[in-house]
Image (cartoon, helix red, strand yellow):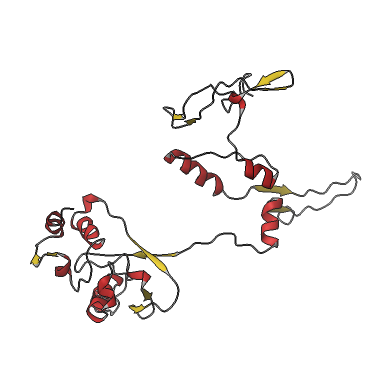
Amino acid sequence: MVDRKCSKKYANKFSEHTSIDVNGYLIYRRQVDGRFIEKSGGKLDNRNVVPYNKYLLKRYQAHINVEWCNEVSSIKYLFKYINKGPDRATVAIVENCDDAVTVNVVHEIKQYYDCRYLSACEASWRIFGYDVHYRTPSVLRLPFHLSGQQQVVFGGEDNIDNVINRPSVASSMFLSWMHCNQIYLEARELTYIEFPTKFMWKLDERCWDPRKKGFSVGRIHSVYPTVGEGYYLRILLNKVKSPKSFEDIRTVNGKTFPTFRDACYELGF
């Protein structure tokens, strides 16, 4: 209670329909049906009911608030809440002596501990060896680049000619994908984003191999429209199959266009 009012906006107002207010909060339907209970001398009706799920209340014997989230702000709040991390507590241990004559040398560094607090539920979760987090299915980031513009990592003292002639420069993940389209018939039925479902990227060998086990999905790096040609190239990579070169990506119905932008317009994108 804040200033004799509930900070959670209870009791709510009666409403005939569920709606969303200007701040993005849900206003649930609360009908005037005449039903109420008495508690501490007051009458509680539908305006005081917290959203809940009967099965969850009976199953876990606990107060569980269930909300139907259909606003971006609500979803952001939930993710922020569950990822805010464990609580922490700072503990300092200090010696105490009733004898005023005795002088104890206190080693402040040894007696100062920065402790991490684990709640009972979090401790039990670790004792039973449950997974703290996991990701399924595995997601593979798929970089791409324009012709001759692949990223190259080198040190300040490296010779530039040696850097350019490295085998890894000519075997980027994106270029290797187009090379696989020349070798494997199965690869020609997949777009770039679908490629990890059937092929696996071997980092040490800098090549794609047919997948023998497991499953993975691909995600192409996002690009802003202000980038220009890179933005239109990304659009085409979601649709074009079996290109063997950059020219094939710009080819539509047998006609090769000078830019990726023109190819996108020709396809109606």
For the question of whether residue 118 can be seen, the reply is no
For the question of whether residue 236 can be seen, the reply is yes
Q: Residue 204: x and y, percent?
A: 39, 79
Q: Quadrant of residue 123?
A: bottom right
Tell me the residue at 61%/29% (across/down).
49
- The quarter of the image holding the N terminus is top right
| Count of numbered circles on the image | 0
Tell me the residue at 50%/23% (across/down).
15
**As drawn, 76 above or below 46:** below
From the viewer's perspective, tell me whether residue 44 is left or right of residue 220: right
Q: Residue 6: x and y, percent?
A: 61, 24
From the viewer's perspective, tell me whether residue 172 is left or right of residue 136: left
Q: Quadrant of residue 175?
A: bottom left
Tell me the residue at 85%/49% (across/down).
103
Q: Quadrant of residue 34?
A: top right
Q: Residue 106: x and y, percent?
A: 78, 52
The residue lying toward the viewer, choosing from 107 and 188, is: 188
From the viewer's perspective, tell me whether residue 217 is left or right of residue 124: left
From the viewer's perspective, tell me whether residue 19 is left or right of residue 50: left
The residue lying toward the viewer, choosing from 43 and 89, is: 43
The residue lying toward the viewer, choosing from 74 and 14, is: 14
